Image (cartoon, rainbow, N blue to C red):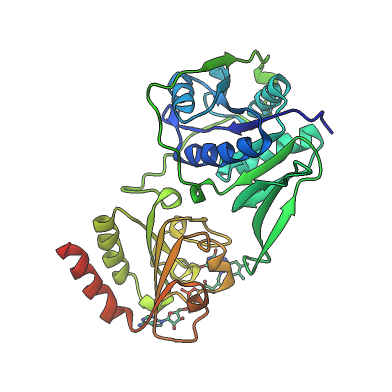
Amino acid sequence: MAAAGRGVLVVGETVNGHLSPTTAGLLAAGQALKQDLEGELTAGLVGHDLTAAAAESLQAGVERVYIVDDVLLQDLPVDLCLHALAGLYQATTPEVILFARSPWGRELAPRLAGRLGVGLLQDCLEVGIEPDSRRLTALRPVYGGNFLARVRCAASPQIAVLRSQAYEPLAPDPDRQGEVVAVPVDLDVSQSRVRVVRRVRHEHPGVSLTEARVVTSGGRGLGGPEPFRDLEELAGMLGAAVGASRAAVDAGWVPGHWQVGLTGVTVTPELYLAFGISGASQHMAGCSGAKVIVAINTDAEAPIFREARYGVVADWQAVLPAFMEAVRNL
Ligand SMILES: Cc1cc2nc3c(=O)[nH]c(=O)nc-3n(C[C@H](O)[C@H](O)[C@H](O)COP(=O)(O)OP(=O)(O)OC[C@H]3O[C@@H](n4cnc5c(N)ncnc54)[C@H](O)[C@@H]3O)c2cc1C
């Protein structure tokens, strides 16, 4: 177990050289923890060409940004990133380390925890600090999303992987300045057992499902692929992304990366519109973090109505066209 330090380190991620939206949410969560810990909020970035992302981290409210900037980190090879993160930890010794629940965060956080000999809190919906013990606590779904458990870190540093979209990003202050500290870490290709052979860019026009503030989602109740074209049109009008249940994916109506749920993606939009989805626990595991769920289902006993803020017991064919017309008129 490593020595306990102070403050909160947010491990940031970049998209095309800029701070990712998930990091912005993570920084908001870090701000709240920092106040409870009366420590410092810092960001750690590993990668290459991090100048813009470092400036954006400062604008988003961190006091200092620690970077490991190396051309060897350009493709974010996992072994070298871990090495760089361990170096960041040694340089900063924070009390709390936050990762986003992104593919990268989910891969690196357990490895860093293993390297430091501590446990970690995975898949957290919200995090807080126990006032007396200064322990990091979190609320996280368990048993396929059927229950929420309150858990706490037992060792230090305390590491959590957070669904950061649940946190409202703080408004950036473009005039805000701060310190960017380059952390020297010796990196060597021989430390990497993983080589990036090829990158395949997955093009998805419009809003990404994991970052969407509104999701229009459909299930087996839609009866076929055609109604998903309507959901896409509705999504276009609302600036939303389209999701689906596994039943719709398994039927071949929509691509697999649209699947929301335990074995699909997790979404945390402000509004989740579910058409013809029963609300199986495995589906809800991926969308129960939505602020408002609206369910449209012919079966008044469908489980989704237990979690939906608003429910319409009706055939989607009566509701969807009328709703689209209303949105069009707006
Ligand atoms: C290990 C495991 C992992 C899984 N992971 C996932 C996952 O990640 N995501 C996921 O979604 N599922 C997952 N599942 C599957 C999950 O258990 C459900 O089978 C699936 O979510 C059901 O999809 P559905 O709600 O579209 O279909 P159904 O359960 O068949 O529900 C269709 C609903 O549509 C309603 N309906 C029918 N006609 C209409 C109409 N005309 N208008 C309005 N409503 C109508 C019905 O009343 C019904 O409630 C997983 C299962 C397992 C075992």
Residue at image location 51% in from the left, 21% down from the top: 48
Residue at image location 43% in from the left, 70% down from the top: 248
Residue at image location 53% in from the left, 36% down from the top: 27
Count every numbered label the image shows and give the total: 0
Above-or-below relation of 103 to 222: above
Where residue 92 sits: x, y (%)?
69, 22
Above-or-below relation of 116 to 306: above
Above-or-below relation of 57 to 189: below
Residue at image location 45% in from the left, 38% down from the top: 170
Q: Residue furthest left?
A: 329
Q: Residue furthest right?
A: 1
* Image quarter in which the N terminus is found: top right
* Image quarter in which the C terminus is found: bottom left
Where residue 162 sits: x, y (%)?
60, 46
Where residue 52 sits: x, y (%)?
42, 22
Q: Is residue 60 left or right of residue 222?
A: right
Q: Is residue 191 left or right of residue 270?
A: right
Where residue 153 sits: x, y (%)?
76, 46
Of residue 38 and residue 137, the one placed in the foreground of this image is 38
Of residue 18 and residue 97, the one placed in the foreground of this image is 97
> Image quarter for residue 133?
top right
